[in-house]
Amino acid sequence: MTSIEMAKEAARLLSEKKGTDITAIEIRDLTTIGDYFVIASGGSNAQVKALSDAVEEGLSKQGFEPRRIEGYQSAMWVVLDYYDVIVHIFYDKTREFYSLERLWADAPRVDLGLAE
């Protein structure tokens, strides 16, 4: 699976669990930390955890384990690091505060092919 395929699969898994405002940005030409960020929101801490679990379980079934998971206990901002793809799952208000899309405004957006 290529990194773009993994990003799209993570987005699909997030969409299936009713994640909101799902987007992906290509960061490969701007940093060495990865190729893509996938960003999504959940309306509650429980939903943020459910979204995180869905991505972790779904990608695990395909043979991919995260290098690291951060923020799961507080569920305000969970990061699942899959080396080339880094998944950020925010509680709604936390996402507004940190505004990753604004910080990475120079990064191209990725068409995820998700139904709106």
Image: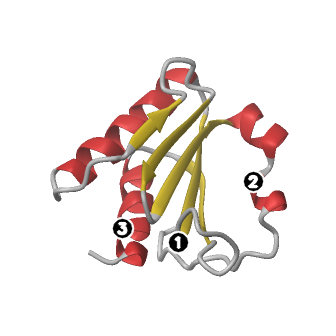
Helix, strand or loop status at disc 3: helix
Q: Is residue 59 left or right of residue 26?
A: left
Q: Are marks 2 and 1 in contact (CB under 8 Å)?
A: no
Q: Amino acid at mark 2?
A: Leu
Q: How many marks?
A: 3
Q: Nearer the viewer, mark 1 or mark 3?
A: 1
Task: Where is residue 69? Give x, y as percent.
Answer: 44, 36
Residue at point 25% right, 42% down?
57
Question: 10 Å neighbourhood of mark 1: few (<14), some, or many (≥20)?
Answer: some
Label of residue 100 in the image: 2
Q: Is residue 107 left or right of residue 11?
A: right
Label of residue 63 in the image: none
* Residue 116 appears in the picture as rendered: no
Label of residue 35 in the image: 1
Label of residue 6 in the image: 3
The image quarter containing residue 3 is bottom left
Q: Amino acid at mark 1?
A: Asp
Looking at the image, tell me whether mark 2 or mark 3 is earlier in sequence order.
3
Q: CA distance from mark 2 to mark 1?
A: 15 Å
Q: CA distance from mark 1 to mark 3?
A: 11 Å
Task: Where is residue 70? Give x, y as percent.
Answer: 51, 32
Task: Where is residue 71? Give x, y as percent.
Answer: 54, 28
Q: Is residue 13 left or right of residue 80?
A: left
Q: Amino acid at mark 3?
A: Met
Q: Can you say which quadrant of the picture contains the N terminus?
A: bottom left
